[in-house]
Image: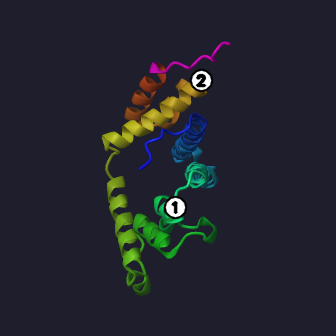
Amino acid sequence: MDSTPMPEPLRRAIHHLVSEGVQNCQEVLRYTEPDQAHTWQRMTLYRATDAADTMDMVALLIAAYCKRTGMAAHTLQSYLQVGQQAIRAHGPHEEDHAHVAGLVGEALSYEAMRESTNRMRYDRGQRQAEQAQSPEGDPQKLFTEACLHGLRAKLCDDIDSLDSYLPPQVAVMARRVAESLEVPEPATA
């Protein structure tokens, strides 16, 4: 392995893109809240695909640099995990429909259940539906949401908005996160 550090311009470009992707992820969470009922379908899809596209840009930017510096094509393909890339343009696949069926408590057809991927995704949907019946409690997930919401509220200078759409325990943590952050001042020359 090459032990040369990442060039600073590339590192900064990646940090910028990852921050943009995280902001889009936060907006996906925001548009799942009850007060967004009128727009959740459109906006969660927009922001989720924006986040995915931005992270694809990160991977491809790094890949372009690696190719430029002589990485072998087969190594690059392996690192990009191209076999895992699902193409959104074709719309939801059969296993995605199986996942939704599990989430909403609908039965799958015999033909659909014959596919192991469909059964796995259906079972995952059922487990997630069961977990949704109990209060949100995974501390790591709650903390991650609080950090994202708190950061966004601080950047938008709208900390009071946190109380209007978050579960109470996340709102408290998000407020603490936002209040603890200092907005960086532009560097002076």
Q: Amino acid at mark 1?
A: Ala
Tell whether position 182 is magenta: yes
- Residue at 61 percent of width and 52 percent of height: 68
- Residue at 42 percent of width and 72 percent of height: 106
* Quadrant of res 140: top left
Looking at the image, is mark 1 or mark 2 earlier in the sequence?
Answer: 1
Pick the front one: 72 or 25:
72
Q: Residues within 10 Å of mark 2 (few under 14, many from 20)?
A: few
Magenta segment range? 180-189
> In this picture, is 25 found above or below 186?
below
Pick the front one: 164 or 127:
127
Q: Position of residue 182 (x, y in %)?
A: 51, 18
Residue 51 visible within the image = no
Q: Quadrant of the C terminus?
A: top right
> In this picture, is 148 found above or below 102?
above
Mark 1 to mark 2: distance in Å?
47 Å
Q: Position of residue 30 (x, y in %)?
A: 54, 42
- Residue at 32 percent of width and 59 percent of height: 130
Mark 2 lies on a secondary structure that is loop
| Residue occupied by mark 2 | 157
Mark 1 lies on a secondary structure that is loop
> Of the numbered discs in the image, which one, if any, rests on residue 72?
1
Q: Amino acid at mark 2?
A: Asp
Residue 63 visible within the image = yes
Q: Position of residue 84 (x, y in %)?
A: 48, 66
Q: In the rendered structure, are the residues bearing label 1 and label 2 in contact, judged by CB atoms less than 8 Å apart?
A: no
Q: Position of residue 56 (x, y in %)?
A: 58, 54
